[in-house]
Image (cartoon, grey):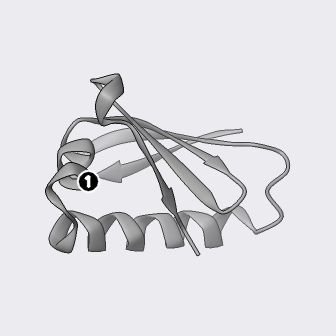
Amino acid sequence: MRMLITFQNKLVPVYFTTENKQPTQKVLRLLNNTLELKIQKGKSALQKCLNSLISIEIKGSEAILHSYSENDSLALSLY
């Protein structure tokens, strides 16, 4: 399943796997809260990834953040 969220004034696609047991709205709320917190207080590598974010893939309790540069992509725990 695919949804769009607004992050830093741009639309970012979020892809879900069917194995996710949490309700979609709860996962999106957790994702938004985590991203906002990390853009404010995260390490520079994480902020670099968030500034060039192109898509997010949710697998279970992890969000895989994909950026323009493959080297900047990383995984982030939501729980």
Most extreme residue toward the top, as rendered?
A: 69
Q: Which residue is mark 1?
A: 46
Q: Residue at x 62, y 49 (%)?
A: 58
Seen from the viewer's position, the closer of residues 55 and 41 is: 41
Q: Position of residue 65 (x, y in %)?
A: 43, 43
- To which quarter of the image does residue 79 belong? bottom right
Q: Residue at x 38, y 36 (%)?
A: 73
Q: Is residue 70 left or right of residue 52?
A: right
- At mark 1, the secondary structure is helix
Which image quarter is the N terminus in? top right
- To which quarter of the image does residue 39 belong? bottom left
Q: Position of residue 63 (x, y in %)?
A: 54, 52
Q: Position of residue 26 (x, y in %)?
A: 63, 73
In the picture shown, does residue 42 fall above or below 68?
below
Seen from the viewer's position, the closer of residues 48 and 32 is: 48
Instruction: Check disc 1: other Cα within 10 Å, few if <14, some if 14-19, many if 20+.
Output: some
Q: How many marks?
A: 1
Seen from the viewer's position, the closer of residues 52 and 43 is: 43
Q: Is residue 36 left or right of residue 12?
A: left
At label 1, the amino acid type is Leu
